[in-house]
Structure formats: structure tokens, C-alpha cells
Image (cartoon, rainbow, N blue to C red):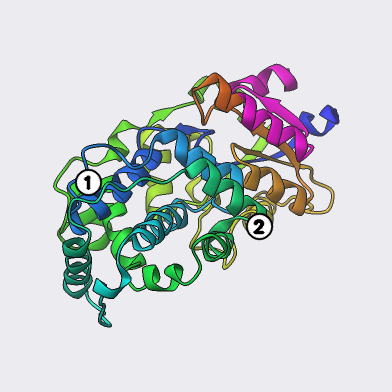
Amino acid sequence: MKLSIMKSGIIVWDIDGVLIYVGDSYRRAIVQAVQYYFSELIGLNLERNLMTIGDTQRFKLVGRFNDDWKLTYASVLCFLTKLIHDLDKREIKSDSVKDFEGMINELRKLGTTAKGFDLQLDLGYITERIKDEGGGLEGTERALEEIFGEDLEIAKKFWFQNLIKRIFQELYLGEMLFREKYGEEPIFVKSDGLIKNEKALINLKSLEKLREKFFMGVATGRERFEAEFVLKKHEFDRFIPLDLIVSSEDVEIGKPEPDQLLECKRKICEKYNLDEKETNAVYVGDSIDDVAASKNAGFFSIGCLSAVSEDEEKKRLRREFERLECDLILEDANEILRIVG
């Protein structure tokens, strides 16, 4: 391994699954948002969860699901298309709507048709087909069209991405932070927010030691509000300046494209008067999109397995990292100290 690159230079961090464990926050927000859409808004009154935390990792391994909102949109569309496929299409009617009230009314009408329906879907099979189609939302639509045909287009009439995002954000942020970020009262969820469950995966002593040798920044799929909040909450901003965060709002195209990583390196080099061409850079991530982004940016790639807790999931993630020729695979980010000494 090219470990000499690790002796100095720049470390760019992903947040989720690397600095912070999000299995009980972002991942759970995906599961709960999908459940809320079908059980509460459509009104299926489901007795079991449609998804598990493990299912969210299935989507992550497909690729091009670095954005958890898009992963949630894709999950909802999969279940919606299956629901439409199993219903009598002659009873399904929809109108064009623009506001949340209209969207909810449309979903309730669909729920009247689907009353008592037991919605089931083999997500293992579906995600493999999505992977074959290139991953992401685009691959999801191609896979669903191949499997369910014209039912996809009917399902998309009940696929309200703005509504899904609103539910997700209310679940994740909770009342206080949602109000602080958006200046509005939550509509659907009155709770403390799943963000309260987030725990640090790297300790402050590790960051302090690494800061002695490296200039550090963040390239994350989070929006800036959430990124700054978590860095300040866990005191990571003592070692990673907030002005060296590159969030999803700072670039047009996210990972696996290299734009975020390159922008973060540019900002670090500008701040500390470093030569961009002569300064080595490392990206530490937890997903195949992170490794791909590292390769695309010409960075040394470190893949962390700390995003998942189950042994079998770790093995699958490791195999994917190896397939992508990740330069270094670690159990967690604290192990970087062992490499650099």
C-alpha cells in the first residue's frame, strides 16, 4: 500500500459513518419516513416495518445513493410501484397537485383503494436489479420499469418527493432544530428528533494527534446546517474548521463525482497557502460512492467499516471496497493513527 502518502498533507473527512454513527439517526429516518408515508399518509396502518436498517445498506451498496433523501425517494418509489402493481388500476385516480394538503389528499384516495392491503417487496432482488441499472434514482426507475412496466408511471403520480423530504427532515431534526433551520413549525412529527441519537466514532485525542500532521476538512452529503451542528456538538470543530466544510449545497454534483473533494482540497490549500499540485490528499469515507469519489479526485482512499454493525454487512462492504481497489480499509477512523504513527 502507498502508505508514504499518509505521512503528511490533507485529510478530508466524510461525516456519516466515519466521524459519526448514523445507524440510529439518518438510517432510521429513512426507515421511519418510508413507514410514515405508507402507514400514516396512505393509511395502510401497517403492523410491521416495510424496511430495516440493513435494507438501507443494501441501497448504499448499489451506488449513487450518497444522498439519504434520494435513497428515501427511491425506497418509497419501489414500494409505491409494487402497491400499484397489485391493485386494480381501474380504481386508481389522481389529480395534479402542488401543495402538501393536495398531496396528502391524493395519498388518502389511494389508501381507500388499498385498504387492508399487506404490502410486501423483496428489496434484496430489487436492489440487485437497481445495481445492474447503474444505481441511484435513475437506475431505480429503469429497474422498476423493467420489472413492473407501466405501473411505474402510475406510481409516480403518487410519488411526492417534497413531501417525503419534509417528513424525513422532521423525523431527523425534531421540533426545535427543524424550527431553527426552516423557520417553520413541523407538520407531521412532534419529537426530539433522531439527530439526538448520533454518537462519535472518532475520539478527540485521535483528531488532535492527526491535526499535528495534517490539514483537515470535510466533504459531506449533509447540508451545511447539519454538518456544522454535528461538528460543534462533538467538538470536532476544535480541529476541523467550519469554513473547511464542503456540504451538498456547495457543489452541483455530489459523490461519486469528485467535485466536493476537490473543492475541499482547494479551500484547505488556499487557507494554509499550500501548493495544490504538490500536496497529497486523503479521503476517509464509509461507502462505495466515497471510494469512487476518492479515485475520481486522485486522492488516496480510506474506507471505514464503522457505518455498519453486523458482521455479514461488514464483510459485504469490505468486498465492495476491495473490488473498487480502495487503498486502505479500516474498522474505524481511529486506526489511522496506527498507520501514520
State left or right for residue 108 relative to residue 330.
Answer: left
Any magenta on residue 326? yes
Real-space Cα separation, disc 1 to disc 2, in angstroms: 34 Å
| Residue drawn 61% across the image and 40% down it | 216
- Residue 325 sits in which quadrant? top right
Amino acid, disc 1? Gly
21 or 219: nearer the viewer? 21
Q: Which residues are magenta?
A: 315-341
Amino acid, disc 2? Gly
144 or 56: nearer the viewer? 144
Q: Residues within 10 Å of mark 1 (few under 14, many from 20)?
A: many
Q: Tell me which numbered mark, 1 or 2, is placed earlier along the sequence.
A: 2
SS for dot 2:
loop
Residue 125: x and y in percent read 54, 44
Residue 234: x and y in percent read 39, 32
SS for dot 1:
helix
| Residue drawn 32% across the image and 71% down it | 89
| Residue drawn 33% across the image and 67% down it | 162
- Residue 76 sits in which quadrant? bottom left
Q: Which quarter of the rendering shows the N terminus?
A: top right
273 or 198: nearer the viewer? 198
Residue 21: x and y in percent read 44, 31
Q: Give me the disc on residue 114.
A: none
Does 93 appear above or below 45?
Answer: below
Any magenta on residue 340? yes
Q: Which residue is mark 2?
A: 134
| Residue drawn 36% across the image and 65% down it | 161
Q: Which residue is mark 1?
A: 174
Residue 39: x and y in percent read 21, 50
Q: Which quarter of the rendering shows the C terminus?
A: top right
State left or right for residue 38 relative to residue 318.
Answer: left
Can see residue 38?
yes
